[in-house]
Image: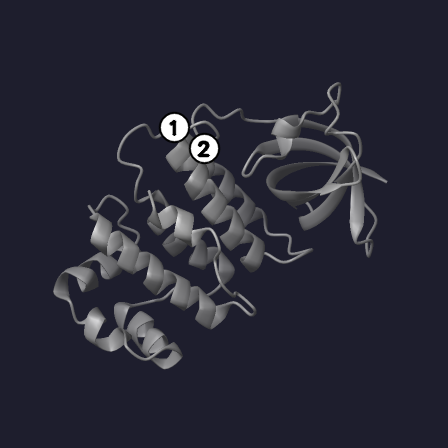
């Protein structure tokens, strides 16, 4: 049966000579897997650009409950980006966030509030031309609200990190780091974070995600992100 839904492209793998199998987080059905035939040919409609990480889509899809792989009838970009898929730094951040989302959002988990948050966040990121180097730090803190494990206080964050991995307690005693963490937990997204604290916060957040997301594993894109 055909359904209309919005979607966010996350990743794809090549399939046969000209096709792909794509992971797309949809508004109606949550995370789903779609096969798109012929998309890698020179005359393909739709184009491969529609399946680049974090592309916002309008889709008409064939969907059957219980089926693992679905098909796309129609697809188009709903909100074209201006910088997110051309700026090298933003592309690297997008790859990092795509990997995080692929590990945290599971097949069939429909969540309209999460979908709305992701869309608005990526549109905002695309529009930022300066001072966007901390976007992914703020994003990871905010994302925990929608995944069900947002820390309610700095003490909760500290306790859970200390339980998960030894060595965090002395680091978390740093007054500046504590101030930044408290501000982020409380949703204050306009605070300045330098490069050293940004790296430390990413490590803290990834450990926090490790403690709450089953089979979270290694984030392979982190090494490239570190090089920016």
How was this image coloured?
Answer: one colour
Q: Position of residue 42 (x, y in %)?
A: 73, 20
Q: Position of residue 36 (x, y in %)?
A: 77, 36
Is residue 26 among the parts visible in the rendering?
no
**Residue at 66% of width from left, 26% of height from top?**
76
Q: Residues within 10 Å of mark 1 (few under 14, many from 20)?
A: few
> Label 2 belongs to which residue?
123
Identify the image quadrant of the N terminus.
Answer: top right
* Relative vertical location of residue 196 with respect to residue 162 in this rendering, above or below: above
188 left or right, relative to 90: left
Give the camera-side residue of 165 and 140: 165
- Quarter of the view holding residue 153: bottom left
Give the CA separation, mark 1 to mark 2. Answer: 6 Å
Q: Residues within 10 Å of mark 2 (few under 14, many from 20)?
A: some
Q: Position of residue 90 (x, y in %)?
A: 41, 36
* Relative vertical location of residue 86 with respect to residue 143 in this rendering, above or below: above
**Residue at 27% of width from left, 68% of height from top?**
154
Question: Helix or strand or loop: what does disc 2 sit on?
Answer: helix
Is residue 192 among the parts visible in the rendering?
yes
> Label 1 belongs to which residue?
127
On residue 83, the disc is none
107 left or right, relative to 78: right
């Amino acid at each position: 049966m055909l359904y209309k839904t919005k979607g966010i492209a996350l990743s794809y793998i090549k399939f046969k000579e000209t096709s792909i199998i794509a992971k797309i987080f949809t508004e109606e059905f949550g995370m789903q897997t779609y096969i798109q035939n012929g998309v890698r040919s020179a005359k393909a409609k739709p184009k491969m650009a529609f399946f680049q990480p974090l592309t916002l889509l309008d889709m008409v899809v064939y969907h059957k409950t219980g089926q693992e792989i679905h098909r796309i009838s129609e697809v188009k970009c709903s909100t074209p980006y201006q910088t997110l898929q051309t700026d090298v730094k933003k592309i690297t951040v997008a790859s990092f966030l795509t990997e995080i989302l692929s590990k945290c959002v599971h097949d069939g988990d429909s969540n309209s509030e999460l979908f709305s948050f992701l869309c608005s966040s990526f549109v905002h990121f695309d529009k930022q031309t300066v001072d966007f180097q901390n976007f992914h730090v703020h994003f990871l803190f905010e994302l925990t609200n929608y995944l069900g494990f947002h820390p309610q206080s700095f003490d909760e964050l500290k306790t859970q990190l200390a339980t998960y991995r030894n060595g965090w307690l002395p680091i978390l005693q740093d007054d500046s780091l504590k101030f930044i963490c408290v501000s982020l937990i409380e949703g204050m997204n306009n605070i300045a974070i330098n490069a050293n604290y940004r790296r430390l916060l990413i490590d803290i957040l990834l450990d926090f995600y490790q403690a709450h997301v089953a089979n979270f594993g290694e984030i392979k894109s982190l090494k490239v992100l570190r090089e920016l």
